C-alpha cells in the first residue's frame, strides 16, 4: 500500500504518524480517524479482505458519520485488528456493532438527513453541495452512482427547494418538507416493545451479572413480548453514543442502573428525561450514599441487594407500569 492513501478506501489522504505508533488518517471520503500500525501496513492484505463487500460501505459511512459528530478536541476513533480486550482500539466488527447501518433507500435517506442537519450547523435555506465521489458515505451508499440516484429520488419526493445536478456533484437547498422529516426522526416510538438497559459494562466494575439480571427481569414480564437491549461499553468514542441514543429513542422503557456512577449512564438518563422516554432508576443498595442529592431528592430510585432481588424488582416495576 502506498503511504499516502487511505487504508479503507485507497484514495489519496493526509496521513501522519502519532506518538503512540498510530496513524492519523484524514480522508475526504472516510473522514478523520486513527489506525494502528498493524492495520495501516496490513491494510492491503488481511484487513481489507475482512472489510470487503457489505462491510466496506458500512465502515466508510460509519467513519464519516463519527468524524462528523466528533467534538472538537476529542480523540478520533481508532481502528485496529483482533483487539481481544485491548482498550486502545476497536476492530472493524466491534466498531460496526455499535453503529446503526441503514439497509435500504428510505433508511439511507433518513441517515443522510441526519448528516445534512449536522452539516447545516443551524443555518436554514443555505445551499448544500455534495460531490458524489467524496460524499457517498454520508448516506452509507456503496458508490458515487448510488448517491446520485438517491439525491435524484429525494428531489422527486420534494425534499429539495432547489436542485442542480452535474456529473460530479449536486447542489440543493433543503425544503420545509425535508426539515419536517428531520424533526420526525427525533420522535421516539411509544409502541415499541424494546427495553433499553443503561448500566456500566466496564470490566473493572464487574457488573455484568447485574445487567443480565435486569435482562432476565425484562424477559420474565409476560404477555408483552418485551425485548431487552444492552450495548457493551468498551472504549467507544463518545460519538458512538449515537447508537445508544438511537436505541433509547426506539424503546418503551429504559432501565437506568446508577451503580458505579458511570458518566455515560448519567448521560443516557438525562437523554431519556429530555426525550420523554419512561425510565426506571435502580442502584445497588451499598452505593446509595454515593449518589448526589440531586438524584436522591428528585427521582424515585429503587435499591437492590443482589441479582435475584434486582430481577424481581425490574419485573414488578415494569408490570406495574405497562398494564
Ligand atoms: Zn478513505
Image (cartoon, rainbow, N blue to C red):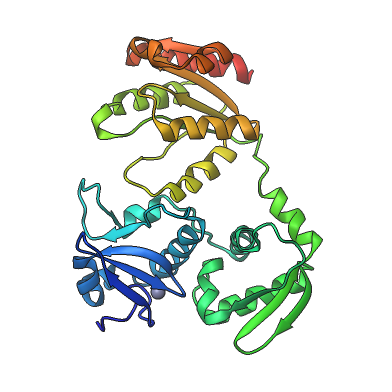
Q: Is residue 220 above or below residue 171?
A: above
Residue 209 in the image: x percent, y percent? 30, 25
262 or 301: nearer the eye?
262
Residue 283 lies in quadrant: top left
Q: Residue at x 42, y 33 (%)?
A: 263
Residue 245 in the image: x percent, y percent? 53, 42
Q: Residue at x 49, y 74 (%)?
A: 142
Residue 22 in the image: x percent, y percent? 24, 63
Residue 141 visible from this viewpoint: yes
**Figure quarter occupied by ligand 1:** bottom left
Q: Residue at x 75, y 78 (%)?
A: 163
Answer with left or right where residue 70 lies relative to residue 10.
Answer: right
Residue 216 in the image: x percent, y percent? 40, 24
211 or 83: nearer the eye?
83
As drawn, which residue projects farthest toward the bottom?
167
Residue 225 visible from this viewpoint: no
Task: Quadrant for the N terminus, please.
Answer: bottom left
Q: Residue at x 39, y 51 (%)?
A: 97
Task: Quadrant for the C terminus, please.
Answer: top right
Q: Is residue 119 above or below residue 167?
A: above
Amino acid at each position: 500500500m502506498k503511504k499516502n492513501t487511505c487504508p479503507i478506501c485507497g484514495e489519496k489522504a493526509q496521513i501522519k504518524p502519532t506518538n503512540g505508533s498510530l496513524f492519523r488518517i484524514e480522508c475526504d471520503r472516510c473522514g478523520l480517524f486513527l489506525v494502528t500500525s498493524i492495520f495501516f501496513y496490513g491494510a492491503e492484505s488481511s484487513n481489507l479482505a475482512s472489510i470487503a463487500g457489505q462491510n466496506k460501505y458500512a465502515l466508510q459511512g460509519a467513519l464519516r458519520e463519527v468524524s462528523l459528530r466528533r467534538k472538537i478536541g476529542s480523540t478520533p476513533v481508532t481502528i485496529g485488528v483482533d483487539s481481544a480486550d485491548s482498550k486502545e482500539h476497536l476492530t472493524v466488527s466491534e466498531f460496526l456493532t455499535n453503529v446503526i447501518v441503514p439497509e435500504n433507500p428510505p433508511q439511507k435517506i433518513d441517515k443522510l438527513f441526519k448528516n445534512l442537519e449536522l452539516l447545516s450547523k443551524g443555518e436554514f435555506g443555505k445551499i448544500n453541495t455534495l460531490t458524489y465521489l467524496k460524499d457517498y458515505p454520508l448516506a452509507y451508499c456503496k458508490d458515487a452512482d448510488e448517491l446520485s440516484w438517491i439525491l435524484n429520488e429525494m428531489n422527486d419526493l420534494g425534499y429539495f427547494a432547489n436542485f442542480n445536478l452535474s456529473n460530479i456533484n449536486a447542489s440543493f437547498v433543503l425544503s420545509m418538507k425535508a426539515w419536517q422529516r428531520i424533526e420526525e426522526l427525533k420522535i421516539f416510538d411509544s409502541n415499541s416493545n424494546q427495553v433499553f438497559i443503561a448500566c456500566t459494562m466496564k470490566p473493572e466494575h464487574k457488573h455484568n451479572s447485574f445487567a443480565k439480571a435486569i435482562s432476565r427481569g425484562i424477559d420474565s414480564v409476560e404477555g408483552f413480548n418485551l425485548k431487552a437491549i444492552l450495548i457493551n461499553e468498551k472504549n467507544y468514542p463518545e460519538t458512538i453514543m449515537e447508537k445508544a441514543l438511537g436505541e433509547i429513542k426506539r424503546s418503551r422503557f429504559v432501565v437506568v442502573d446508577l451503580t458505579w456512577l458511570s458518566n455515560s449512564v448519567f448521560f443516557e438518563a438525562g437523554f431519556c428525561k429530555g426525550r420523554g422516554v419512561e425510565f426506571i432508576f435502580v442502584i445497588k443498595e451499598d452505593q446509595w450514599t454515593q449518589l448526589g442529592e440531586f438524584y436522591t431528592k428528585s427521582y424515585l430510585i429503587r435499591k437492590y441487594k443482589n441479582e435475584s432481588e434486582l430481577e424481581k424488582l425490574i419485573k414488578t416495576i415494569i408490570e406495574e407500569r405497562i398494564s
